[in-house]
Image: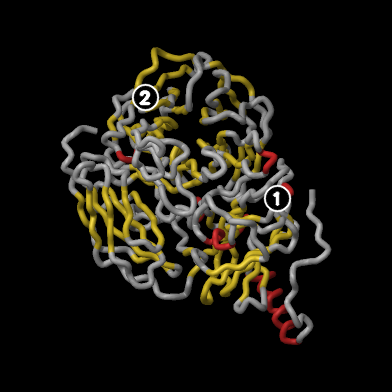
Amino acid sequence: MFHKDKSDYKKIENKFHPSYLLCLFIASLVFFFGCRSTPEEMNTFCNPINIDYQFNIHPTWFTGQNLWREAADPVIVFYKGDYYLFASKAGGYWYSNDMSTWTLVEPEGLPIEDYAPTAFVMGDRMFFTAMRSNRVIYSTDNPKKGIWKKAAEIGPYMLDPALFLDDNGKVYLYYSGSPNGPIHGVELDPDNNFKTIGKPFACLYGDHKNRGWECRGDDNMGVSRRNRLEIIPWIEGAWMTKHQGVYYLQYAAPGTEFKTYADGVFTSDSPRGPFTYAPYSPFSHKPTGFVPGAGHGAIFKDKYSNYWKVVTLMVSAASDVDRRVGIFPVDFDDDGQIRADTYLGDYPQYLPRARKKTANSNLAGNNLARLMLLSYGKKVKASSQSRSLPAELAVDEDVKTYWSASTGRKGEWLEIDLGKTCRISALQVNFAEHRIFAFGRMFYHQYLIEVSPDSQNWVAVVDKTNARKDVPHDYIELTKPVEGRFVRLTNIYSPGQGRFSVRDLRVFGNGLGRQPDPVKDFVVQRNPQDQRRAVVKWEKVQGADGYIVRYGILPDKLYNNYQIYRENSIPINSLNANGDYFFTVDSFNDSGITRSKIIKKAKSTHTGDL
């Protein structure tokens, strides 16, 4: 159903004045020759990735308050020149030749509404199964057409299956999800209908008593909000990667509903183990930022032999399983330590064709496009707002919150004052689903984005007034940056009879100012009674919008991080109890990042075993 309005959005006054006509002519030239962007021109992407996430229905969906989108537990495989993305509860799967634009496939007969899909390529065929697929493995040689056939039945019901093809042709299935584990493995015979070979074997267990990151909760405190009793984490989401003869068996904890959802890793020289806990775990960890979470995913190689990790990102607003998909670059350092680079992981980063290797490939944020966030906490105004959903929520860097206009009519708008003239290079419109009453594959968004130096004369930089795509996290990279102070998003059509609502309108580029001063000193206070926990404190520095605490088990391996705006201290409860850690604190603003040269050690006095 279309919303109709007799009036267009408000026009600029004095529109026939000669100066205005000149401005309009210049604006047209800028729009047609400087600011257009097409998928073929994209060199960057921004998490969460922009796919048409399917809606799930709550029993009280008719109120318009309990609808949520979901795609989680993702897997990407590279097959015949394209990337194929499978995810839980997706209503299908997607393919892309560049990891920028994704096309949905809705196959028949495949359990695409199931949780925890897994896929791998063997020979010229792709194989697939999922958690509740009636023990069936499916195969295809034409996934774009969605034509699959039953290949085998693999035995009993298994939680969170992960198929792994070794380079010697042997196939293994890793699976399980339970409090504290274990993760199991079993060998399959691809030459005999994928029947199991021998008995399943236990691979790893959780140990939240020693591993702080496994403790449940958004803060890894591991206690119930109601009775403050300790809760055992849920160990799930196995995935296996082999690199230079080492087997990296990954697993997720503490639970899919938490910001702290992350992946740890055990290693072995055999796919059967024994497996040894990697003390740098978690290796995929993003508890902060616009959209947190980095657990239950899969590592894959792109067409240029670079590693990536596709992960589950958390919204967890309308439901605990309100989730999205993100992609982070992955590297193995010279010592074989694996890390997913989540440093400013929801800022623009390079796509595979533009990904660059630098002299210091171990530096966190190596794949960032160096486009800084310009819109955080800036002044905003709107055409209208719904009760308790003010415009300020559209610039708060929190995916859980959102601004909503009072209607979904054409002409509702949101305007951001960046506070100064900035160079704008990319934008991300993260739509919310407020009071949605209808949805489906014809669900789409139409809007216009304009930039102005003075909030009076506007230039259109993104025109999607005739679009026919569902774009819940629409990311647009301008082919040529444009300078301006004000950014306005205007609604043309809101889908699903809903109100025009935005989680965040994120503006990226450069603030054309000085980078912040470096953090000159900081203190790390490790909890003497609980070595899994520490607090990092520092003095605020001139010009900083926020800070990034980097840490790791060696001074040249500060791979994990926490991001924080404006504050100058943060609790970190994700440490392994019996290991020393090293810390540093970077500062950043809308004009860049200033790395700290100070590294401090926090020793462990813990005597237990991991």
**Residue 588: percent from the left, percent from the top?**
39, 65
* Residue 123 visible in the picture: yes
Q: Outermost residue toward the front?
A: 227
Residue at the disc numbered 2:
182
Which residue sits at x=27%, y=34%? 209
Work out whether residue 493 or residue 296 is closer to the camera in this orientation and state it. Answer: 493
Please state which amino acid type lies under the numbered disc 2. Answer: Pro
Q: Which mark is residue 484?
A: none
Viewer-side residue, 494 vs 476: 494
Q: Residue at x 33, y 30 (%)?
A: 206
Q: Earlier in the sequence, mark 1 or mark 2?
A: 2
Q: Residue at x 56, y 36 (%)?
A: 87
Residue at the far bottom: name it: 18
Residue lying at 76% horizontally and 80% vertically, measured from the top left:
15
- Residue pointed to by mark 1: 498
Residue 349 in view of the camera? no
Indicate the quadrant containing the C terminus: top left, top right, bottom left or bottom right: top left
Residue 100 at what x, y percent from top left?
A: 58, 50
Specify few, some or many for label 2: CA neighbours under 10 Å numbering under 14, 14-19, or 20 or more: some
Say which of 199 and 430 sits in front.
Answer: 430
Amino acid, disc 1? Gly
Residue 453 to residue 337: above or below: below
Secondary structure beneath dot 1 equals loop
